[in-house]
């Protein structure tokens, strides 16, 4: 999200300096200066950084009290609020929840949008805020139907704004290209005939004053691609909500996505972003196949083929950490969907051996992808990857429990628990290094739970005494995600 800044064209020293900002431009400049100070401290001192960012918002707010029609002040305030919401370390310094800050950011973006409804940046940013709110509303399998319905509405509004944004960007790009085509080249007679004012001439028109110019980033093919990829990613999330909220909308979703995928592929040519587009396409294909399978529109064998081919064949090794992790998630989601459909069929009877074998196979493949990802250079978010590795081992362990009773899972139960505990312990250490407090808390809780399942209750009891709410929340999430069976829940209940 580009920042609306001011470029100082001509600075004249004044004998009497005002005590504070007097104009909209001065409020904007002061706010940008506070933001830049916050950026300097972002990596090292989150508390100090957040104070500067809060000061910047206060300056934008103060400016808007005097100049309510200033789009740049409104835009910067909205953009900064959303930026803070996406930085957990900064958010932790503020007396506000993520949901509340996102709602504030949405209100601010709507205000900016009212001031300039055809601004591509604010259209794009407002859509981003809506997608973040939608994701927050729908995250976790325990989300209520009303929350998921609200999330779907926000995603749908985001799609409308992204489409408006793309139309504006495409128009601006075409206009810019037409102007470049018609503009005379330097040295041409037509160019020499133009009267270009000199700096001295400009200064003479505004003696003793500072002049400012807004910095606006030009629209390029990459800009159009950014918006298109954002649309595909939003559709990917909508797929999951369609399962419970509007399964009849899947044909529309498939039809709507087709031109988007084609447009993304076309725009990516010559940009160096082909892999990024292929990844967004693969994630959408997997999400759509999952939704189609869960709603009975797709058979299991076809679902497997879609997942296996979405990221390329096994003969073509994936080249990025993100691709490996996303494919691993697709494999894990496939096993979750098999559990979901099997549970609908029967809550007590033993699952068919074939289904158990398929789940074991894809969990093993997911674990292999995640392991490969950890060995690649400069791996980001190692804590999350190790958490996912622990989840894979725990899901394989659960296959050994009723009603699955998978033979290989039963025979490997001790090793699987030991591996899961090791991965969770590693995740906690990496989270501490990465200063990822949420991941650290999750990893410590999961490690303690697995240790308890292995027969050692000391870690779990100690952690419950320190932060029982966090531990119980994690246990509930583990149950909802299939990481704990009913038998495991009963054992844990007796121990804590």
Image (cartoon, helix red, strand yellow):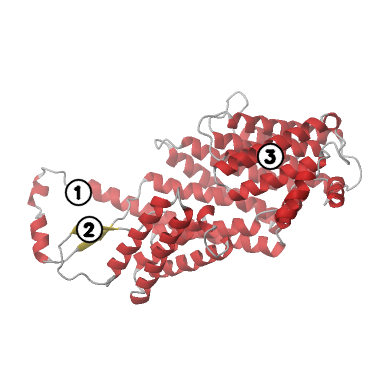
Q: Which residue is mark 3?
A: 424
Q: Would residue 477 be seen by someone viewing this image from the given angle?
A: no
Q: Quadrant of residue 324?
A: top right
Indicate the secondary structure of the residue bearing disc 3.
Answer: helix
- Of mark 3 and mark 1, the one earlier in the sequence is 1
Task: Report how far apart the C-alphas of labels 3 and 2 lie in the structure.
Answer: 52 Å
Left or right position of 425 against 112: right
Task: Report how far apart the C-alphas of labels 1 and 2 lie in the structure.
Answer: 27 Å
Answer few, some or many: residues within 10 Å of disc 2's Cα (few below 14, many 20 plus, some between 14 and 19).
few
Cβ–Cβ below 8 Å for labels 3 and 2?
A: no
Indicate the secondary structure of the residue bearing disc 1.
Answer: loop
Residue drawn at 21 percent across, 48 percent down: 182
Left or right position of 380 against 181: right
Pinpoint residue 408: horizontal percent, then vertical percent.
83, 29
Pinpoint residue 165: horizontal percent, then vertical percent.
43, 57
Q: Would residue 105 be seen by someone viewing this image from the given angle?
A: yes
- Of mark 3 and mark 2, the one earlier in the sequence is 2
Answer few, some or many: residues within 10 Å of disc 1's Cα (few below 14, many 20 plus, some between 14 and 19).
few
Indicate the secondary structure of the residue bearing disc 2.
Answer: strand
- On screen, residue 461 above or below 20: above
Circle on res. 22? none
Pinpoint residue 116: horizontal percent, then vertical percent.
38, 66
Circle on res. 8? 2
Pinpoint residue 243: horizontal percent, then vertical percent.
70, 53
- On screen, residue 147 above or below 337: below
Residue drawn at 68 percent across, 36 percent down: 423
Q: Which residue is mark 1?
A: 183
Marker count (numbered): 3
Residue drawn at 8 percent across, 60 percent down: 201
- On screen, residue 240 above or below 394: below
Q: Nearer the viewer, mark 1 or mark 2?
A: 2
């Amino acid at each position: 999200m580009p920042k609306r800044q001011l470029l100082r064209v001509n600075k004249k020293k004044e004998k009497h300096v005002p005590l504070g900002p007097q104009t909209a431009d001065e409020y904007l400049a002061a706010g940008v200066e506070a933001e830049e100070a916050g950026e300097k401290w972002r990596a090292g001192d989150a508390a100090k950084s957040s104070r500067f960012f809060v000061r910047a918002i206060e300056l934008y707010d103060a400016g808007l009290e005097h100049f309510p029609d200033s789009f740049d002040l409104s835009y910067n305030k909205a953009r900064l609020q959303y930026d803070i919401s996406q930085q957990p370390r900064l958010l932790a310094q503020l007396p506000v929840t993520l949901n509340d800050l996102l709602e504030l950011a949405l209100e601010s973006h709507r205000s900016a949008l009212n001031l300039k409804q055809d601004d591509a940046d604010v259209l794009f940013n407002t859509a981003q805020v809506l997608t973040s709110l939608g994701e927050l509303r729908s995250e976790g399998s325990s989300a209520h139907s009303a929350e998921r319905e609200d999330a779907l509405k926000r995603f749908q509004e985001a799609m409308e704004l992204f489409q408006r944004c793309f139309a504006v960007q495409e128009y601006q790009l075409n206009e810019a290209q037409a102007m470049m085509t018609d503009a005379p080249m330097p040295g041409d007679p037509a160019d020499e005939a133009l009267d270009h004012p000199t700096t001295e001439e400009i200064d003479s028109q505004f003696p003793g004053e500072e002049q400012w110019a807004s910095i606006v980033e030009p629209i390029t093919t990459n800009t159009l691609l950014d918006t298109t990829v954002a649309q595909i990613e939003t559709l990917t999330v909508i797929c999951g909500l369609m399962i419970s909220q509007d399964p009849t909308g899947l044909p529309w979703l498939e039809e709507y996505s087709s031109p988007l995928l084609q447009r993304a592929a076309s725009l990516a040519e010559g940009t160096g972003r082909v892999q990024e587009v292929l990844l967004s396409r693969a994630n959408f294909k997997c999400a759509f196949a999952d939704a189609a399978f869960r709603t009975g529109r797709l058979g299991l064998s076809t679902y497997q083929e879609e997942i296996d081919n979405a990221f390329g064949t096994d003969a073509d090794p994936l080249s990025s950490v993100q691709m490996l992790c996303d494919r691993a998630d697709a494999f894990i989601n496939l096993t979750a969907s098999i559990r979901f459909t099997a549970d609908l069929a029967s809550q007590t009877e033993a699952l068919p051996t074939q289904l158990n074998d398929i789940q074991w196979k894809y969990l093993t493949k997911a674990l292999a992808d995640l392991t490969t990802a950890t060995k690649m250079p400069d791996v980001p978010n190692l804590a999350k990857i190790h958490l996912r590795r622990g989840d894979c081992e725990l899901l394989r362990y659960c296959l050994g429990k009723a009603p699955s009773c998978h033979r290989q899972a039963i025979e490997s139960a001790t090793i699987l628990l030991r591996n899961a505990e090791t991965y969770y312990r590693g995740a906690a250490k990496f989270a501490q290094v990465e200063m990822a407090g949420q991941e650290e808390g999750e990893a410590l809780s999961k490690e303690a739970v697995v240790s308890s399942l292995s027969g050692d209750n000391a870690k779990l009891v100690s952690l419950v005494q320190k932060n029982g709410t966090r531990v119980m929340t994690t246990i509930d999430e583990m149950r909802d995600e299939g990481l704990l069976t009913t038998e495991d829940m009963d054992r844990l209940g007796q121990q804590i």
